[in-house]
Image: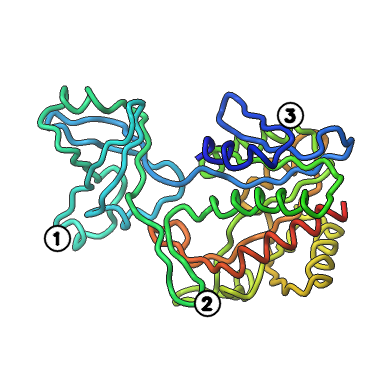
Amino acid sequence: MQEIVKKYMQEWADEIRADEMGDVVCVLNPENESRIMLSAHADEIGVIVSNVTESGRLQVIERGGIIQANYPGQQVMIQTKNGIIFGVVEARRELFEKGGVKAKDFLIDIGARTKKEALERISLGDAVVLDTNIRKLMNGRFTARALDDRLGVFIIMEALKCAKEKGCTAGVYAASTVGEETTKNGAYWCSTRIQPDLAVVVDVTYCSDYSGMDPSEAGNVELGKGPVLCNSPIAAKRLNDKMEKCAADIGIEIQCEAASRLSYTDGDQIHFSNQGVPIVLLSIPLRYMHTPAEVADEKDVEACIEVLAEFLCRC
């Protein structure tokens, strides 16, 4: 993912920086004393290999907030040092009837006949993700895994490109971070090295427009109705106001949500880094978060890019 970002941004960024953890920061106008950090995370949820049984099956533990019931019977990809190995999470009717399935119950079949054979291809700690595809739906909507938050990475990179075309003179540091789903170390490393004056965090947020969602918890957020600003104790009100004005001036509708504590995004680490960093959280409406088939809307993505680019040009 990060190698794709580097290649994609090569002709647009004035500098591309990387660190030991795998974070990638694309910089515009590094000579400017002002520093605006854009943050979105490239990592995704999944499981990691914790053991191999005598029969060659892989046992795993969680990496991030997976929904365990999504995994039995699914094809998976194991990311190894020698490339991708394919597998299947064992499933049988009784497992579903039992209910309460946990990651420790998973057995991944990669076709190996023995533990020794499996360990010739697999190492403990290898990451495992569901083997799914991106598909277009009706009305400009699309589905894939890990739209949380690779959509955000796409948005901040496109906003940097758009801002450059519009003549932005501010120093912009678009960080594609690692570790948000587990430790949030990537955002912390990037912020402490960039030392930003402010940060815009772009992540996904729950839609309330499908069954089982309760708008009383955060408000009404609908797919296709535009980017979402979060009113939260860690979001700077003046930055929210500025982002909202930018959107209004270019004719883009903004949705709002409420949070009473932390944002549970990279913004939490960035906000408390250095001597404190004011942040604004700009979110993409998302259905079915942390499933193999998250759903987003192209209009929301395009609107996020336009609003963010306008914001950067006014900083």
> Which of 233 and 315 lies nearest the eye of the viewer?
315
Residue 123, which numbered label?
A: none
Q: Amino acid at mark 2?
A: Asp
Q: Position of residue 260 (x, y in %)?
A: 69, 61
Q: Position of residue 235 (x, y in %)?
A: 77, 55
Q: Residue at x 61, y 63 (%)?
A: 301
Where disc 1 sits, the SS reads helix
Where disc 3 sits, the SS reads helix
Q: Earlier in the sequence, mark 1 or mark 2?
A: 1
- The picture quadrant where one finds residue 174 is top right
- Left or right: where 210 falls relative to 301: left
Q: Mark 2 = which residue?
A: 209
Q: CA distance from mark 2 to mark 3?
A: 39 Å
Q: Position of residue 132 (x, y in %)?
A: 34, 54
1 or 3: mark nearer the eye: 3
Q: CA distance from mark 1 to mark 3?
A: 51 Å
Residue 193, which numbered label?
A: 3
Q: Mark 1 = which residue?
A: 93
Q: Amino acid at mark 3?
A: Arg
Q: Residues within 10 Å of mark 1 (few under 14, many from 20)?
A: few
Q: Residue at x 56, y 55 (%)?
A: 151
- Asked if 312 appears above or below 195 in the picture, the reply is below
Q: Position of residue 66 (x, y in %)?
A: 41, 51
Q: Residue at x 63, y 54 (%)?
A: 155
Q: Amino acid at mark 1?
A: Arg
What number of labels is visible?
Answer: 3
Q: Residues within 10 Å of mark 3 (few under 14, many from 20)?
A: few
